[in-house]
Amino acid sequence: MVRTFAQARVRGIVAVLVTSMLVTAGVAAAQPPSRETGPPGSVVRGEALPRQWWLPGAAAGSVITYRTTGPRGVPALSTGAVFVPPGAAPAGGWPVLSWGHGAVGIADRCAPTVDGRIDNGYLAHWLSQGYAIVATDYVGLGTPGVHAYLDGPSEAHALIDMVRAARTVEPSLGPRWAALGQSQGGQAVMVAASLATRYAPELDYRGAVALGVPSNIEHLVPFGDPAFPPLPLTGTAVFIAYLLAGMRATYPEVEVDRFLSPQGRDVLARLENLCYREAAAEFPDLSIGELLARRTDDPALVGAARDMLEIPTRGYDRPLFLGQGLTDTVTPAPFTVKLVADLTAAGTRFVFRPYPAGHLETMRASLSDATAFVRELFASGG
């Protein structure tokens, strides 16, 4: 449902790899055909954002509803916040950072601009560096349909179209922009970075920073099984349940319920109304095996997972920065190492930095490196 402010708003090396891949799968989500007309990035509505939700130091804060390309290429709506730094914009307008947030859940009330949890101090740093911040909620978080969590193409389109839309409501924003994201947002950034110059050629896309990227999950989806053991990782079963709930809605032909146990169907129904913190508290000991009634090696399910989850290894025509925490138990390092190897084999040029940090902590650990990297993006070419 489109919101108003009155609603104010996932043993041995092989086992470790299987574990890691499955843990980071969140939910892909359904998006029914939108009746909205107009090009991607066009604005449907703009409103003032409650002042208490502004980034510290922002000169203005607003929330917009805009058109974008949703799951399976269907036109859709998304929402997001726009923040402008203080002072006069530089010549050519404020440089823009488009932020991709991490997992929050799939219910409308979990959207950052619905519950007000837009920043934990990280975005305020970037605003203080003289960048305008635009922060999509993604399709289905506060807009029609089930949120497409870890549906990479949908997230990427929302991230790019957020820049287009923000420039409509804030004329002080320039065409130069870069992508910045963590966890789910890291996946969104990777997919966006692989298509940005083709999808939005009228913008001046400069590069991307992606942290804690969930990757290579699609290769291990066939290993899901009722006998799958409990995993020593953070949020594994909840993320897998989110993935299955979203797939069920987005790919009805897969018939996801065929793979679910009675308990699994009950969990998915509950998670459609729970934000991630609530879900993690309600299902702290849930295992992936408990969700399933049969092995998840069906070609239709595997194909849908690939369409949603796959990180491109080519198409990056602007600088790319990857950061990974070595003690991350949500998106474990072995899978990012595999991503790094795949990108290198494909001939992609990028910067990779590992940090002795956990999942969320990598944002802070990488901040100095990322700040210098982004500064250089905007320093080149005017």
Image: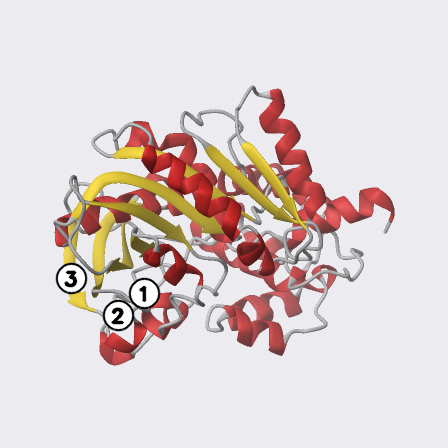
The amino acid marked with disc number 1 is: Gly
Query: Could you tell me residue 135's position as x and y percent?
Result: 33, 56
State whether residue 286 is above or below residue 196. Answer: below
Query: Could you tell me residue 379's position as x and y percent?
Result: 33, 35
Q: Which residue is mark 3?
A: 46
Looking at the image, is mark 1 or mark 3 earlier in the sequence? 3
- Is residue 38 toward the left or the right of residue 362 in the image? left
Badge 2: how crowded within 10 Å, few (<14), some, or many (20+)?
some
Which quarter of the image is occupied by the C terminus? top left
The amino acid marked with disc number 2 is: Arg
- Mark 3 secondary-structure assignment: strand
- Is residue 261 toward the left or the right of residue 139 in the image? right
Q: CA distance from mark 1 to mark 3?
A: 14 Å
Q: Which residue is mark 1?
A: 142
Q: Which residue is mark 2?
A: 3
Badge 1: how crowded within 10 Å, few (<14), some, or many (20+)?
many
State whether residue 341 is above or below residue 146. Answer: above
- Residue visible at 44% across and 38% down? 191
Tell me the mark number nearer the camera, choosing from 1 and 3.
3
- Residue visible at 52% across and 45% down? 369
